[in-house]
Image: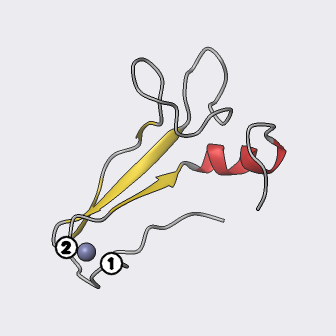
Amino acid sequence: MTMKPSSTCPGCNGRRVYASKEISAGGGHAPDYLPGLGQSWWSGAAKLTVVVCADCGLIRSFAGEDALRKLPDSKHWRKL
Ligand SMILES: [Zn+2]
């Protein structure tokens, strides 16, 4: 299963939607948005892709595939 951010904005139905490269989900001075889902202690935080709508400014973020795989077994997360 691959997360594919839609190219249509769910906020305004606009189509001027831009995705970032994969960026670190935290570490350093930033809060860690995906605790416990990083590769390992030596390679740092999990990766995420940020998608921004150029019309309404809605920001969505999508966890990388490695993080998604770890989610079900991570003690940092509980299923709702
Ligand atoms: Zn929008």
Q: Amino acid at mark 1?
A: Gly
* Callout 2: CB less than 8 Å from ligand 1: yes
Q: State the image quarter where residue 6 is shown.
A: bottom left
Local SS, label 1? loop
| Rendered-image quarter of ligand 1 | bottom left
Quarter in which the N terminus is drawn: bottom right
- Secondary structure found at label 2: loop
Which quadrant of the view contains residue 75? top right
Query: Which residue is nearer to you in this view: 31 or 39?
Result: 31
Q: Which residue is mark 1?
A: 11
Residue at numbered disc 2: 16
Q: Residue at x 49, y 67 (%)?
A: 4
> Along the line of sight, which residue is nearer the eye, 56 or 63?
56
Residue in view at x 76 percent, y 62 percent: 80
Relative to 60, is 1 on the left or the right? right
Residue type indicated by callout 2: Arg
